[in-house]
Amino acid sequence: MSKVITRFAPSPTGVLHIGSVRTALYSWLYARQQGGTFILRIEDTDKERSKKEFEENIIDGLAWLGLAHDEFYRQSERGAIYKKHLETLIAKGAAYLSKEEATEEGQRAEVIRFKNPNQVVTFHDEARGDISFDTTELGDFVIAKDFDTPLYHFAVVVDDFEMGVTHIIRGDDGISNTPRQILIQEALGAPRPAYAHLPMILAADRSKLSKRHGALAVTEYRDEGYLPQAILNFVALMGWNPGNDQEIISIDEMMKLFTLEKLQKAGAVFNIDKLKWLNKHYLKLLSIERVGEELLACFPDTLQKQVSQNPIIFSKVIPLILDRVANFSEVRSLVEEGELTYFFEDPRYLPESLLWKDERDPVRAIVHIDKSIELLRNVPSENFTTEGVKLALWDYATEVGRGNVLWPMRYALSGRDKSPDPFTLADILGKEATLRRLEEAKKLLQS
Ligand code: GLU
């Protein structure tokens, strides 16, 4: 068996799309797994539509995902190679110059046409089995506008030949191009690579996936705070599965288990909730230092300063944040909604808020807060944990009514209608701040 060579061949006419990432990933995985070579080839023959910024976006996106290439090419820099092969085909009689229909200006440009041998072309697709096409209907198709301007099909075939590509893994919009490309290949005397066409990625309603179904550029997902490992896991399982219903799969496992035989034929459905779920999973696997850094980057200056003054509180808040967000951009919403501020500064609220719905008497509330303070003072600092605080208060709260004790305490600690339970809050804030906030609450009710 010859060495495996795969390629990802995007046209820089748009940003790196989540669907194209799948093509890139499978090509990369297969090459790496087989000890082969993975090529990145920028197909920029369409001068009008190709843009440098898209090329940069594609390169950045792949680098961020860790899909490193071994070789890099740009079709716009390979004119001489295409020209040489055009000349060879013409010399062989497999292509010829022909006059086009007159243009509006009355000029008749010359183009290069492929002399179609009019055969039925049958090729094997790893995902779909054998596919046959009668190529007669294609006629003598154009392969270049002139010697310096090859068209897409021709450049692709020459490149795959010159680069020794053994496996072409691409989207299923490539299927209808394949027979024409095989004809050119045969005329060039190029070996036929293996083909695997991947099923289309569909939106949840089975329509074609488009921008209105969410962000689609990989760099947008990056900027929203998704992790590369979540994106790769997500796209890996849209069109392939390891033969079981495993949903979490690492790159190492993919590398071990990936096979072209397990590619799916049916369209894969894009499910953003699944991506969020995966991202949440991978966020929790990050080191606390790394998450800390990422979170800090989402915080405004004031909050950053408070965090640096209260590193212990911050380290305890991190898991709570991770429970509530699927990506880092959701952290910004938490901050904006004031969901994090009270961990770092004493809250302000109206005294009535401290009263539990079934216990509206401030005098009774003061009694409960007072008793809570007394019970918590007796808890040694080293036992001032979620469990320790709960243990100290539970019997009393059960005796006089849990809401009567726990609501005012929770409100005193957070100043919010919704927050984690008071035991968790006390643990995060520590003994000193907890007692101070309870004293404050008492004063507020007394005033
Ligand atoms: N350049 C083509 C595209 O972006 C893909 C070519 C291929 O994979 O054969 O759609």
Image (cartoon, rainbow, N blue to C red):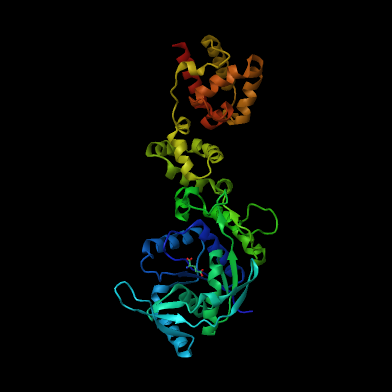
Question: What is the x, y in percent for residue 405?
Answer: 58, 18
In this rendering, the answer to whether 274 lies above or below 370 is below
| Residue 351 as seen in the image, left or right of residue 395 | left
Q: Residue 4 appears in which quarter of the rendering?
A: bottom right
The structure residue drawn at horizontal position 52% and vertical position 37%, both measured from the top left corner, is 317
Q: Residue 267 appears in which quarter of the rendering?
A: bottom right
Q: Residue 81 appears in which quarter of the rendering?
A: bottom left
Front residue (pair 197, 291)? 197
Front residue (pair 376, 351)? 351
Front residue (pair 322, 75)? 75
Front residue (pair 80, 384)? 80
In this rendering, the answer to whether 222 lies above or below 300 is below
The structure residue drawn at horizontal position 38% and vertical position 64%, both measured from the top left corner, is 49
Q: Is residue 391 visible?
A: yes
In this rendering, the answer to whether 425 lies above or below 444 is below
Question: What is the x, y in percent for residue 233?
Answer: 58, 55
Q: Can residue 282 be seen in this view?
A: no
Q: Quadrant of the N terminus?
A: bottom right
Q: Quadrant of the C terminus?
A: top left
Question: What is the x, y in percent for residue 343?
Answer: 48, 31
The structure residue drawn at horizontal position 54% and vertical position 29%, both measured from the top left corner, is 425
